[in-house]
Image (cartoon, rainbow, N blue to C red):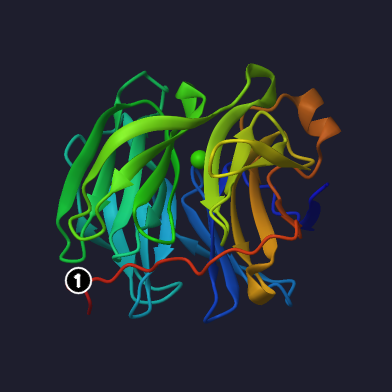
Amino acid sequence: MRAELVLDTRCGLGEGPVWDERGRLLYWVDIMAGRVQRWAPDSARVETMEAGEPVGAVALCEDGGLVCAAQSGFAVAERFGGALRPLASYEGASSEIRMNDGKCDPAGRFWAGTMAFDFRPGAGALYRLDPDGTVRRVLEGVTISNGMDWTADGARMYYIDSLRRTVDVFDFDAETGAICGRRAVVEIPEDAGVPDGMTLDAEGRIWVALWGGGAVRCYSPEGKLEEVIEVAAPQTTSCCFGGEDFSVLYITSARDGLSEAQLAGAPHAGGVFAARPGARGRAAHRYRRTTGAA
Ligand code: CA
């Protein structure tokens, strides 16, 4: 199966798609450009919100508004296009480190991890922003913190530290947010690219975007390869289900790291792609903040 180009946005580092089923909008970020973008699939217009610094991920708030994992810390905006206000910094923040991929868990906490701009091994970490605005450092020694998602029963959390080349899973305590028992469920072969962002479908299957692989792969919960969706952008970064009945898999991509020759062969790199693989997704969890609201 091949994904189709739906938006020729030419993002340097398009990442972190989130479907807003209430507004019927797709949100994503262009990380190094410091942009949060959104688009209604029945329109041709992409709206942009400037974060003023690199922004690794965006999530929706339960009470409206947005929460972002910006380079310097977590920040909230009361509405799209509104001012982004710092909410909380994180231990280890520096000019050499930035936030990367993030997502909300079933209890409404916002998780995001970090990485060094120079990809220094082990310089990143995984953080958890609780509803009351408290930030906890949950995992250390991370190199490139990337995709995550939670099973529908809230018992497990998937997580990708890209250079390990695996999709890992933790036992997850939804009540406390604690994670333990890390093990790998998927190993990505060297010639398939590097695992980047991911999402689970309604049946718990794992959809992983492959940086350098020009594809999204679907694995069973047990780690068996079930499907490959080809994407005409080698740097395939992340994916989420959205659209009518969550039946469309939206896929983000990047131009970063591609040579002139590679860009000539993949002119739509950095665009947003879509496929209808016959699977359905679930609504994204939202940040249930109890603080920081205007
Ligand atoms: Ca990523």
Taking the image as drawn, is residue 71 in sight? no
Residue 26 left/right relative to 170: right
Taking the image as drawn, is residue 140 in sight? yes
At which x and y percent is residue 136? 17, 47
Q: Is residue 181 above or below residue 36?
A: above
Indicate the quadrant where residue 42 lies.
bottom right
- Measuring 36% from the left and 18% from the top, which residue is drawn there? 121
Q: Nearer the viewer, residue 91 or 36?
A: 91
Indicate the quadrant where residue 201 lies.
bottom right
Residue 227 left/right relative to 290: right
Which residue was labeled with disc 1? Answer: 292
Q: Is residue 116 above or below residue 86?
A: above
User: How dense is the environment of label 1, judged by Cα within 10 Å: few (below 14), some, or many (20 and up)?
Assistant: some
Q: Nearer the viewer, residue 5 or 256?
A: 5
The residue most toward the front is 222
At which x and y percent is residue 106? 35, 63
Q: Quadrant of the C terminus?
A: bottom left
- Measuring 74% from the left and 39% from the top, which residue is drawn there? 233
Q: Amino acid at mark 1?
A: Gly
Residue 188 left/right relative to 145: right
